[in-house]
């Protein structure tokens, strides 16, 4: 079985910035990404967890399928957010997650340029 590549914040940065219209900035003092000024994702203060804007049904499904990588805390329970343990997530899953989150936020004009 091949060894999986460790996902780091650099991996997150590469994936996020490859999406059309995504810009890097900060949120709550940590590195963050936005698409047309809408929050997409940010690194939590622990430096090991990513917060991603993600809708409820899909969020719950991801947590059920892979609770090692995807979770929420009580703080995020009432918000459409998903927490991602970078040390536990597969790069392909992270890429899929960020792209789906981006598609839910990006204006139609950006979406049409990505297809």
Image (cartoon, rainbow, N blue to C red):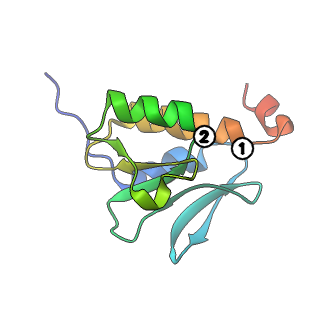
- Residue nearest the observer in this picture, 64 or 39: 64
Q: Is residue 111 left or right of residue 17?
A: right
- Where is residue 57? Give x, y as percent: 54, 31
- Where is residue 111? Give x, y as percent: 77, 33
The residue indicated by pointer 2 is: 101
Q: Is residue 45 left or right of residue 99?
A: left
The residue indicated by pointer 1 is: 105
- Where is residue 35? Give x, y as percent: 71, 52
Q: Which residue is at a point 32% across and 40% down the rendered structure image?
A: 89
Q: Judging from the image, what secondary structure is the residue with disc 1 in?
A: helix
Residue lying furthest bottom: 29
Q: Is residue 70 above or below residue 93?
A: below
* Residue 93 occupies quadrant: top left
Q: Which residue is at a point 57% across and 52% down the rendered structure image?
A: 79
Q: Is residue 33 above or below residue 57?
A: below
Q: Is residue 23 above or below residue 88?
A: below
Give the Cα distance between marks 2 and 1: 7 Å
């Amino acid at each position: 079985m091949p060894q999986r590549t460790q996902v780091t914040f650099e991996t997150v940065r590469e994936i996020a910035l490859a999406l059309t219209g995504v810009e890097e900035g900060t949120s709550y003092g940590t590195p963050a990404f936005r698409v047309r000024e809408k929050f997409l994702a940010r690194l939590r203060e622990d430096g090991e967890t990513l917060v991603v804007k993600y809708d409820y049904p899909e969020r719950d499904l991801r947590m059920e399928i892979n609770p090692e990588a995807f979770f929420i805390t009580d703080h995020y329970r009432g918000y459409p957010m998903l927490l991602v343990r970078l040390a536990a997530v597969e790069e392909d899953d992270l890429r899929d997650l960020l792209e789906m989150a981006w598609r839910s936020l990006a204006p139609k004009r950006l979406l049409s340029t990505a297809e």
